[in-house]
């Protein structure tokens, strides 16, 4: 964050120098300064979002009060797309752990997040299949099923992969289980 502020300050000084030297007009100076400050505001919001997500994940989703767990998980779900990948994976892992929570709202929020993770995993595996990397695709499907064993979509896609590879007995067995 500090490096970003130093970089933005230097960029601001560079724009002011260009204006004083007559290299840019007053309108260009104004637009460049607005762009710099917009970038600063975006970065501040991004880091604030991360600052908010960590306590929600570390404390809120483990709280003994089910309503607190539910609200924390819901807030994390709403901000998940804006979080860095590692934070996002932590949210998805925690959601998978909460699929059997005693509180209905927690289970529902966890199921939504878990299905988002499964969907992303399935998309990734589908891309691997299209690139003829079936072994890697199978491992992605299995990883998704490890997190969310009851996912019908992941089980179906894995069975479909088995069928496409000629392993109809394995595909049928998998489909019959679910």
Image (tube, grey):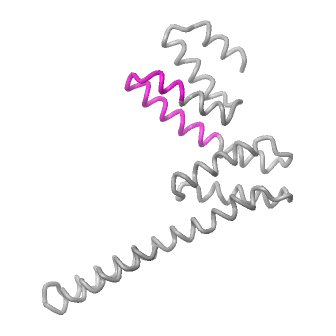
Left or right relative to 5: residue 45 = right
Residue 15 horizontal side relative to residue 153, left or right: left
Residue 117, magenta (yes or no): yes
| Residue furthest front in the image | 3
The reply, left or right, for residue 141 in relation to residue 37 is right
Q: Which residue is drawn at 72% across and 17% down?
A: 177
> For the stretch drawn in magenta, what is the main secondary structure?
helix
Depicted 27 relative to depicted 123: above or below: below
The C terminus lies in quadrant: top right
Give the percent coordinates (x, y) of residue 50: 57, 65
Quarter of the rendering containing residue 36: bottom left
Q: Nearer the viewer, residue 26 or 68?
A: 68
On screen, residue 87 versus residue 95, left or right, reads left
Residue 119, picture quadrant = top right
Q: Where is residue 74 in the image (x, y as percent from the top left)?
A: 70, 56
Say above or below: 157 vs 41.
above
Assess whether residue 34 is covered by the magenta stretch: no
How far across and down, in percent of the image, does residue 123 sit? 49, 35
**Residue 52 lies in quadrant:** bottom right
Identified at 61% across, 11% down, the residue is 170
**Looking at the image, which residue is at 57% across and 7% down?**
168
Q: Is residue 10 above or below residue 46?
A: below
Q: Percent from the top left, x then y, of residue 15?
A: 24, 84
Residue at the image point whose x is 42% and y is 24% from the top? 133
Q: 118 or 60, which lies in front? A: 60
Bounds of the magenta segment: 115-139
């Amino acid at each position: 964050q500090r490096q970003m502020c130093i970089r933005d300050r230097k960029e601001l000084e560079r724009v002011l120098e260009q204006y004083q030297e007559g290299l840019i007009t007053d309108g260009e100076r104004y637009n460049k300064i607005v762009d710099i400050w917009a970038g600063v505001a975006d970065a501040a919001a991004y880091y604030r979002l991360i600052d908010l997500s960590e306590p929600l994940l570390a404390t809120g989703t483990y709280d003994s009060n089910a309503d607190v767990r539910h609200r924390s998980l819901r807030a994390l779900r709403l901000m998940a797309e804006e979080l860095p990948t590692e934070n996002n994976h932590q949210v998805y892992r925690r959601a998978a752990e909460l699929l059997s929570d005693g509180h209905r709202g927690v289970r529902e929020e966890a199921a939504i997040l878990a299905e988002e993770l499964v969907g992303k995993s399935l998309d990734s595996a589908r891309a691997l299949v299209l690139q003829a990397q079936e072994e890697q695709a199978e491992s992605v499907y299995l990883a998704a099923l490890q997190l969310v064993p009851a996912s019908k979509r992941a089980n179906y896609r894995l069975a479909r992969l088995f069928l496409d590879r000629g392993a109809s007995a394995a595909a049928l067995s998998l489909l019959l289980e679910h």
